[in-house]
Image (cartoon, rainbow, N blue to C red):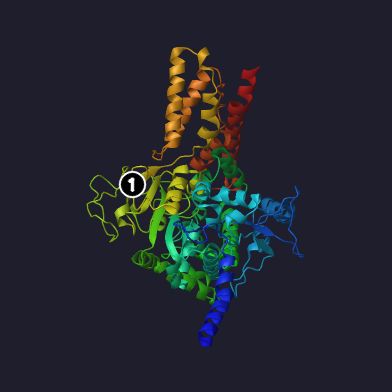
Amino acid sequence: MKKILSFLLVGVLLFSVVVLPSSAAVKTECQGDCDTCPSIVVPGIGQSNVWALDENGDYLLDEDGERISCFPATFDIPSIIGKVIFPALLTLFTQADIGLSDALCQVVLDSFAVNACDPNTGKNTGNIEVEKYPYSVAECSEYEKNEIYDNIPLQAFSQLAGEDHLYYFAYNSFGNNYDTVCELYDFIQMVKEETGHDKVNIVPISMGGSIANGLLQYFPKVMDDLNKVVYIVPALNGSTIVGDLYTKNFAFFDTEFLYNGFLESLMDEEEARMIEVIARILPDEVLTGVLKNVANCLVEDVAANITSLWGLCPKEYYPQAAQMLLADKPEIKRQTDMFYEAQLNSDTNIQMLIDKGVQVFNIVDYDVPLYQIGRSWNTDNADGVIHLSSTSMGAVSACVGDTLGKNYIQANTSKNCSDPTHNHISPDGVVDASAGLLPDTTFYFDGQNHEQTARNDIIISLATRLLATDDIKDVYSTPDYPQFNGQRDTRGLKNNYIPTAKSVDTSKLSAEDAQELAAAIAEAEAFVNGTVCYYGQYREIEARLSNILIKIGVWTAEEEEEPSTFFTDLSLWLFDNFGSNGFSELPFTTVISLLGTIFSLITNYVIAPIIGAL
């Protein structure tokens, strides 16, 4: 009897030592006993705050007293001007590169110093601090909550599941890939312990998709920790922009494109054309030489050492890029080779998740051309930042502005389609989702720009439903969320158009205007509350409300000023007549002709309007 009591006493002591502290660590109200698993957001590039520090470890502040962000670099304008001004003047005066390339390369190295990584280790050497949230959103300060929700507005998920079930994994976008993956694995274990749940959901967004690739490859046991994976525009096979970066396949190395297309894709056309005109101050050969030298510095001395950025290099580009840049960096190549293997095994590892019973969903954007930085910008459909075949796990698509053709037959190559008779071709004939790994659980949004994905409330509500409930099993579960949907941003309708329209005193309106106002409001409210749309529809609805508000005198129609096209006309004239030649390369008679053209343009765009106004 004494032995039995002794065993029982030992058992009670062990229980109190092992179990009670573990229970005390659980911070969720449900104590891990609810149907909704905690969700961890793994954000995209630049969606984590990284702050610059001084030599004492204090935050560096700008002239307004605000902390200085390290993304994508830190720019000290007075210092930059000081380094560049004299070489620039010498280069301009001599029409030859007299130290300008060297000065600009030094500016690149100085500006990216905070994000520099050791070429021997791949570890960040900058004096920085990553703003991390090693606790649930429930424990975040109001400032932290605002930062998180601004990046991924999952307030509705928090309302359904509780803020103690939502976590945000912050990391350095320009850090060490392997270290970040290890941190994510440890973060998942921490969340399990804090919430009492034995499984979690993860939400890899954009660059977070590449981090998830590494997670599944380096820590395959983590598959047993996962309940759902909801990818949102994931860079599962990088971005061709980064592939072109690492292979130095820049579009602007082609001066024909530099002077007629490159800048217009990145900024306002008139501003772009002005820069094109100014750039002709330098001879063509000098300008392109400077650009190539600076690009080489950026790639070889900065980007080549950042392993997290290598995670965005597509597998088709990696062998060539590694051979070009990593021959003398064996440790970095060892690490990037590891990730390359993870990238090659991405589909296999995701399939293993599915085979283990993990629910995997994907939300992607399409039909927005890539930024025209690399020459491969129009080789695939995209969302502006990542090509579609990367985000969609292999879907086939036509280039932006084109279709697959009337006679196209869908591929049906995925074993994950539950029914081979399903039609996975988009209504616009641009995408064949049947070629992707997950045709039944991948949702597509036409015309949605990558950087504005979080502003599409349909995408956010879909992600919320997927994470917080089990209502949606696939793209056929509900007509509320079809496989192919559209781009939208309803903030203007919700915050301005509809409230203004509903505040109008209709008793003072004609019956016709009152009827149109009511109809426009009803259409707008139905649209805002709905979850299906087509590309550009919200603009049409905004226009209808705006028109009736202007008609009844609530709003005043803004007179659109005719935009100036002075530099556009001048740049086009120069390009049509002289290609990419600089001003010093033009013959004297041409210079006289050019001056005449400039005078004519000034007369048309400056003098004539002034005289007309008088």
Residue drawn at 67 percent across, 62 percent down: 129
Residue 313 point in image, percent of width and height: 47, 63
Relative height, residue 430 to residue 43 (above, below): above
Q: Specify few, some or many for label 1: CA neighbours under 10 Å numbering under 14, 14-19, or 20 or more.
A: many
Tell me if 253 is positioned left or right of 522 in this view.
right
- Whether residue 425 is visible to the viewer of this picture, yes or no, is yes
Between 508 and 398, the one lying in front of the other is 508
* Total residue callouts: 1
Residue 163 point in image, percent of width and height: 55, 53
The image quadrant of residue 268 is top right
Between 454 and 249, the one lying in front of the other is 454
Can you identify the residue that label 1 sits on? Answer: 430
Relative height, residue 501 to residue 166 (above, below): above
The image quadrant of residue 440 is bottom left
Residue 120 point in image, percent of width and height: 60, 75
- Badge 1 marks a residue whose secondary structure is loop
Residue drawn at 72 percent across, 61 percent down: 53
Give the quarter of the figure containing the C terminus: top right
Residue projecting furthest to the front: 1
The image quadrant of residue 297 is bottom right
- Whether residue 107 is visible to the viewer of this picture, yes or no, is no
Relative height, residue 19 to residue 314 (above, below): below
Q: Amino acid at mark 1?
A: Val
Residue 335 point in image, percent of width and height: 51, 73
